[in-house]
């Protein structure tokens, strides 16, 4: 019996340990970041056509605000990423008199002016080269993740995860049914009636009912945790639901982190 309990708990812990890091930290690393890192914090409009930031634009060019420029770049990148004959070497940098342009064929994807360069703390050419590398990387990542083979692989992994969840739930149910059968022995050996003068206010039947209630609650709590982790993992693996998984995870982890930090900071006061 003890071996069964240990095996099920170890399998559950290994499953949680593997699954949570899959989506606990969203991928925000981009190739080319080392080419130009901002020397000071300046707010800009984020270009994130595929759910993750590629770069920021900071200044107005002509009648277009930074936000409008970012939206325009996002639309163009989505169009380029969807082209069946896309080639990364077609994303080029062209240096002009007042701007450095990133182009794809005849399409200007984005322009880097002196304001953008100052915000990045580098020259226009360096900033433009960095953005060119980030654009190529972001498109390649998007096309790889959304390729038929990759989607098929992720669907297969998701099916395997669901199968593992079913196996774990089955083992958990067997474990708790076995524990429930053992309660009669525990009732005679461990549980005793508590008396207050001549009144038995906590007899064995009540102790048994409370114990069974705790076991039932623990079982459903464990199943619920496994179910949530499984769904979030599957949502993260599939590209069309990845943003949902990250959003839900943020709602769960951020308050939990605040609670843990608050408890940690309160430990000295608690000891005092």
Image (cartoon, rainbow, N blue to C red):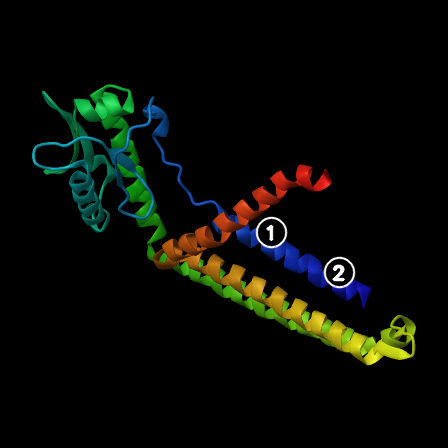
Inter-mark Cα distance, 1 to 2: 16 Å
Dividing the picture into quarters, in which one does residue 168 lie?
bottom right
Q: Is residue 163 left or right of residue 237?
A: right
Residue 203 can be seen, yes or no: no
* Relative image position of residue 106 (x, y in whole percent): 10, 38
Residue drawn 16% across the image and 43% down it? 72
Query: Which of these two is toward me, 52 or 90?
Result: 52
Compared to residue 182, the image places residue 70 above or below, namely above
Question: Mark 2, residues whose alpha carbon is within 10 Å: few (<14), some, or many (≥20)?
Answer: few
Q: Position of residue 250 (x, y in %)?
A: 45, 51
At 32% from the left and 38% from the top, the residue drawn is 137
- Report helix, strand or loop for mark 1: helix
Name above or below for residue 156 compared with residue 45. below
* Residue 76 or residue 258, whichever sits in front: 258
Which numbered marker is on residue 17? 1
Residue at 19 percent of width and 32 percent of height: 92
- Per the rendering, the mark at residue 6 is 2
Judging depth in this view, the residue of 117 and 131 nearest the camera is 117
The residue that appears at 16% across and 41% down in the rendered structure is 68
Q: Quadrant of the C terminus?
A: top right
Q: Quadrant of residue 13?
A: bottom right
Query: Going by the image, does 109 lie left or right of 6?
Result: left
């Amino acid at each position: 019996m003890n071996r069964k309990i240990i095996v099920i708990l170890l399998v559950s812990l290994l499953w949680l340990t593997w699954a949570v890091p899959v989506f606990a930290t969203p991928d925000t690393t981009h190739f080319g970041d080392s080419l130009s890192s901002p020397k000071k914090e300046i707010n800009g409009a984020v270009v994130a056509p595929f759910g993750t930031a590629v770069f920021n634009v900071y200044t107005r060019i002509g009648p277009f605000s930074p936000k409008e420029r970012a939206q325009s770049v996002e639309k163009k990148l989505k169009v380029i990423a969807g082209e069946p004959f896309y080639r990364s070497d077609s994303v080029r940098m062209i240096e002009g008199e007042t701007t450095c342009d990133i182009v794809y064929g005849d399409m200007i994807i984005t322009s880097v002016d002196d304001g953008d360069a100052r915000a990045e703390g580098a020259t226009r050419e360096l900033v433009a080269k960095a953005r060119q590398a980030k654009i190529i990387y972001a498109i390649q990542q998007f096309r790889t993740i959304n390729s038929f083979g990759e989607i098929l692989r992720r669907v297969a992994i998701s099916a395997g995860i669901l199968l593992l969840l079913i196996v774990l739930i089955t083992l958990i149910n067997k474990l708790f049914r076995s524990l429930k059968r053992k309660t009669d022995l525990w009732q005679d050996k461990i549980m005793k009636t508590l008396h207050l003068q001549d009144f038995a206010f906590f007899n064995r039947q009540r102790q048994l009912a409370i114990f069974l209630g705790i076991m039932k609650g623990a079982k459903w709590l464990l199943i619920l945790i496994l179910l949530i982790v499984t769904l979030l993992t599957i949502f993260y693996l599939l590209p069309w639901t990845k943003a949902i998984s990250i959003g839900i995870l943020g709602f769960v982890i951020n308050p939990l982190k605040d609670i843990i930090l608050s408890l940690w900071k309160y430990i000295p006061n608690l000891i005092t």
